[in-house]
Image (cartoon, grey):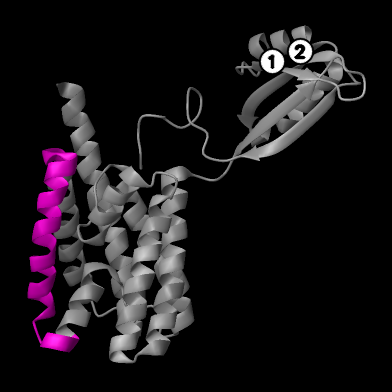
Amino acid sequence: MQNKIVKNIVKYLAIMVGSLVYAAGFQFFLYPNAIVSGGVTGVSMIINAFTGFPVGLMIILLNVPLFLASWRHFGTDFMFASLAGMAISSVFVDMLAATGTVLTDEPMLAAIIGGVVKGAGLGAIYYVGATTGGIDIVAKMLRQRFAQINFGTMILIMDTVIIIVYAAVLGNYESAMYSVIAMFVVSKVIDLVLYGIDNSALCYIISENSEELTQSIISGPMKRGVTILEGTGAFSHRQKHVIMCVIKRTQIAEMRRLVRDVDETAFFIVTDAKNVFGKGFESITELR
């Protein structure tokens, strides 16, 4: 029970900090340079262009069914966390707007730096299992069906479609182009926060001393798990053991020295490994 309370405190603190960073990116960079945010706000602006319906009220009306759907799909905890994300980020946006601070009036600089700051804030909110409402909820639902698409990429696709429609309806093409750049940066920073830098490597080792190498990798300083694959030499037709092992990129030099010390004639292949899940790497149970 106590662990759950501490976990919730950390979650809502992360939502508060993430919301403040998100608001800073939006209010100090994007909004003053007329860079469209996409999402429910963009949809509301498109509807407003056709009907004259108030944007603020439209945002609320669009969010109501999305939050009800999030409650059905993800439960009460997610819904309340997302409500908190939406409310707190909105409050911070208004508070920062009152300062009148604009850090740059150069649209390209605003799109890039604002995108980095906003993406970092959103990434922190998504990391603890919350959203800021709107299209973020739709992206989380779609992630259940299309788990191979990263969260930031999912948001980028939907926001880009909305921004293109916005540009076509209102004829503001230059603003839309800067907005696409900002959304691209936002998506990449979100993915960086959620999934980290690609820092894993997949090793294949073919050696006559596979047993000794295996024991050195498992029991030595590296203490990494190993899988033995069965292979056949195409020229010699001899059966061979192929050692497969996933390591951190910082361990490549150490692995190379280990292989060299055991068998200088070994064949050692290293390739990038992206999104490695399991013991010693990312949790396989948390889908972000």
- Tell which of 233 and 103 is nearer to you: 233
Q: Is residue 135 above or below residue 102?
A: above
In which quadrant of the rendered image does the C terminus lie?
top left
Q: Residue 141 in the image: state x and y as whole percent.
A: 26, 49
Q: Secondary structure at mark 1?
A: helix
Q: Which residue is mark 2?
A: 213
Q: In the rendered view, would you say 232 is above or below 16?
A: above
Q: Secondary structure at mark 2?
A: helix
Q: Main secondary structure of the magenta part?
A: helix
| In the image: residue 2, left or right of residue 244 | left
Residue at 12 percent of width and 43 percent of height: 72
Is residue 112 shown in magenta? Answer: no
Type of the residue with mark 1: Ile
Q: Which residue corresponds to the image point at 27% horizontal and 52% vertical from the top-left?
A: 17
Residue density around tag 2, few if under 14, some if 14–19, many if 20 or more, within 10 Å: many
Which quarter of the figure has residue 135? bottom left
Q: Which residue is mark 1?
A: 217
> What is the magenta range?
49-77
Circles 1 and 2 in contact, beta carbons < 8 Å? yes
In the rendered image, is residue 28 in sight? no
Picture coordinates of residue 2 (x, y %)?
Answer: 16, 22
Q: Amino acid at mark 2?
A: Leu
Q: Position of residue 101 (x, y in %)?
A: 29, 78
Check residue 52 for magenta coloring: yes
